[in-house]
Image (spheres, rainbow, N blue to C red):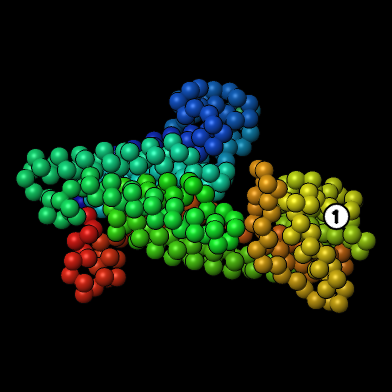
Amino acid sequence: MNAADGILLGMFFATGAVVGSFANVCIHRLPRGASVVHPGSRCPVCEAPIAFYDNVPLVSWLVLGGRCRRCHAPIGVRYPLVEMLVALLFLAAGLLYGPTLVAASAALLGAGCVILAATDLEARTLPDEVTFGTLVLGLVLAALRDRAAAASGQGFAQSFARSHLLEALLGALLGALFLEGVRRAYAKLRGQEGMGGGDVKMLAMAGAFTGPAGVFLTLFFASLAGTAVAGGAALARALRWSIEARRARVSSSSAHAVAARAGLLVSEDGRVLAASARFREIPGAAADGTRLTANARAAGRLLAFVRLARARARRGVRSASGRLALDDGADFFRVLAARAEATPAGLLVLLARADVPFGVFLACGAIGAFVAGRSAWEVLAAGVPWVPRLFP
Ligand SMILES: [Zn+2]
């Protein structure tokens, strides 16, 4: 690598950090229905405007020690993480594709996916501004690639239908139609929403970058990511819970401490002795010292699990739940997993979130399809001569 390459890659990284900073604004404001341009950056706690020198991506968070300069409220670690992630994705785009329109597409898709994964995790929403905005920019970039290819008199040969724009349009259309079909079929069969309309728009967005074949590869990579993430999360949870349960058996006070951190402690006569934020955030959750209750609609499954676990604990049996969906029909929605066993202080119920929203997997899938699409497609479709040409 020579100096010019180094400077170029440095510029990819720095641009990514700045875009990552803007991504943080989108992640915070779009789910709240606020404008991303006005007003300027503010501390969400004390509302003080953030000076430009305190708003340098990555650097400022470290300099300020992760706190607001004025009110010293902690600034979430999400901010530098998002900036770093987007900067690394831009750097990867520069390394893989050099200073080209393909690199611009890759970087843009990466930034869009990071924003969507974060809003889906935090607020369970995929804002239209991001899905549609990124989709439209993807089409614009595809059109620019066609123009560049026409100007240089080459480059058409690889593209399906000899036009990147047509391919992007077909990809977006196929993504939308395919997932909307799946969504409706699922809703009809199960009588409940399996995924939101945002997922459909997000797959259309991915299709605008990866083409029609890439739509299926996006779903394929998304399911791989889903299996890996869900499996890893379940394993980590089981490990953490056995450590917590062992600690809770030591003494009554340690059982209280574990419950306050990671779950719920219920006395012999059914009162809450200690509870963590995971329980307290449930609408209508009982206060300490009172009988275990909560909004019946939201927490019905959890309360039923605890009732069953209490009966089993009297016989010395430990209980583990499957996925407990908690839904109050309004804003509150969680999927929890729980494990319960008797301790000297009472019934210890360990609680953890068990839901990773689909948008996170789609984000991994779209990036995977963009990067590894052609080679993956050639492996999957080995021996079918016309198939590899479907990919850009
Ligand atoms: Zn502040």
The quarter of the image holding the C terminus is: bottom left
Q: Which residue is drawn at 93% across and 61% down?
A: 269
The residue that appears at 38% across and 52% down in the rendered structure is 177
Q: In which quarter of the image is ligand 1?
A: top right
Give the left or right position of residue 184, taking residue 242 as reference.
left
Q: Position of residue 51 (x, y in %)?
A: 49, 23
Relative height, residue 152 to residue 255 (above, below):
above
Question: Residue 356 at x, y = what percent?
Answer: 55, 56
In this figure, which residue is indicated by the disc labeled 1?
Answer: 292
SS assignment at label 1:
loop
The count of marks equals 1
**325 or 40, nearer to the observer:** 325
* Side of 341 relative to 331 (left or right): right
Residue farthest front in this picture: 188
Badge 1 amino acid: Leu
Q: Which class describes the residues within 10 Å of circle 1: few (<14), some (14-19), or many (20+)?
A: many
In the rendered image, the residue lying farthest to the right is: 269
Q: Can residue 95 be seen in this view?
A: no
Q: Compared with residue 164, is residue 69 higher up or lower down, i.e. above or below?
A: above
Q: Name the residue rendered at 17%, 53% in the picture.
A: 161
| Residue 225 percent coordinates (x, y) | 45, 62
Does mark 1's beta carbon lie closer than 8 Å to ligand 1? no
For image coordinates 82% across by 59% down, the residue present is 265
Image position, residue 155 (x, y; %) = 12, 50
Give the camera-side residue of 143 and 312. Answer: 143
Residue 203 visible, this angle: yes
